[in-house]
Image (cartoon, grey):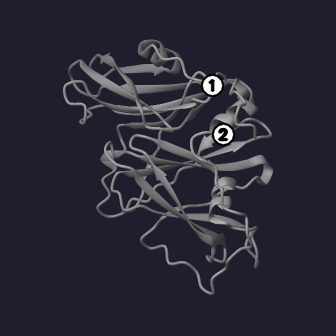
């Protein structure tokens, strides 16, 4: 797809936005390198099932680096299903601080040099590892035939996981460049007193800080922050290639702490205003 295409309110516009967020895979699509035995993924993070165009459905993987001070590298192994054997070679994806790089399954297969399913396999699973305890991922599927997309993320709640590190984060909030699919953040103050919260905003590709806004929320109330409202308060106009923002929420008096319930919803105007929940992020096993 032409990298200069602009995202709009159409399904094609959303696809441009979904496919923007990381450097496309450059590895050759070679023949499948099947190993004689299945991969032991006991200590890895699993993304399964994935979708590679069946019925118009395509998987997009978002790799989020919640570490504010260092690059985080994800290693992804492509595994055939149901054989459990590895295809190609593990692919590495470095992600800057506060960034979340998004790639289609097609791009990941190319980076890994994984060929088409063989030997009875009908699809792929992705096995992730990352030594950084701040890493997280999200799995989104998009249907190019009808414009439907949703959060298909499934978390593994492993021993010692510090999920508190991803609770205050909103990954890949749509900018106004994806006009037909606006994002909205919800912040519910569950305490018995009014509170102020700070939303620190970053470019999803580079991780560069774009500014911060403050939300005052009464006790036991929910505040909403839309794409348009966020951009207006920041005085920010996204470039033609800025489709996604990352937001880190915290108490105004203690930005690294949060006493609120955070949500991320997307309005799908291509499907008569269907509301989609894009909140869930999952930790990657360190």
Image position of 135 with respect to 46: above or below: above
Residue 29 location in percent, x, y?
Answer: 73, 64
Quadrant containing the N terminus is top right
Residue 221 location in percent, x, y?
Answer: 34, 20
Check the image and name the residue furthest to the bottom. Answer: 36
Residue 97 location in percent, x, y?
Answer: 38, 43
Dot 1: element: loop
Q: Which residue is mark 1?
A: 240
At a point 52% along the width and 21% down the height, the residue shown is: 227
Distance between mark 1 and mark 2 Cα atoms? 22 Å
Q: Earlier in the sequence, mark 1 or mark 2?
A: 2
Which mark is drawn over residue 149? 2
Mark 2 packing: few (<14 Cα in 10 Å), some, or many (20+)? many
Image position of 46 with respect to 55: above or below: below
Which mark is drawn over residue 207? none
Mark 1 packing: few (<14 Cα in 10 Å), some, or many (20+)? few
Res. 214 image quadrant: top left
Of 29 and 77, the residue lying toward us: 29
Res. 110 image quadrant: bottom right
């Amino acid at each position: 797809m032409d990298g200069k295409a602009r995202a709009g309110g159409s399904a094609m516009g959303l696809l441009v936005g979904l496919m923007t967020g990381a450097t496309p895979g450059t590895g050759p699509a070679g023949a499948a390198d099947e190993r004689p035995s299945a991969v032991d993924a006991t200590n890895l993070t699993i993304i399964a099932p994935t979708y590679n165009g069946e019925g118009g459905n395509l998987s997009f993987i978002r790799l989020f680096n919640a570490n504010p001070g260092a690059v985080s590298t994800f290693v992804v192994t492509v595994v055939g299903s149901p054989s459990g054997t590895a295809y190609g070679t593990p692919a590495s994806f470095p992600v800057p601080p506060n960034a979340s790089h998004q790639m289609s399954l097609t791009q990941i297969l190319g980076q890994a040099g994984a060929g088409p399913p063989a030997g009875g396999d009908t699809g792929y699973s992705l096995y992730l590892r990352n030594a950084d305890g701040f890493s997280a991922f999200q799995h989104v599927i998009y249907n190019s035939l009808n414009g439907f997309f949703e959060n298909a993320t499934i978390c593994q709640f492993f021993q010692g996981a510090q999920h508190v590190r991803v609770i205050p984060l909103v990954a890949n909030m749509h900018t106004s460049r994806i006009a037909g699919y606006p994002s909205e953040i919800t912040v519910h103050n569950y305490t018995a007193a009014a509170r102020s919260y700070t939303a620190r905003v970053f470019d999803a590709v580079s991780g560069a800080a774009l500014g911060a806004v403050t939300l005052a929320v009464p006790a036991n109330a929910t505040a909403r922050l839309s794409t348009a409202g966020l951009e207006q308060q920041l005085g920010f106009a996204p470039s033609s290639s800025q489709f996604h923002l990352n937001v880190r929420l915290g108490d105004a008096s203690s930005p690294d702490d949060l006493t609120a319930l955070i949500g991320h919803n997307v309005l799908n105007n291509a499907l008569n205003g269907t509301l989609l929940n894009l909140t869930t992020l999952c930790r990657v096993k360190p």
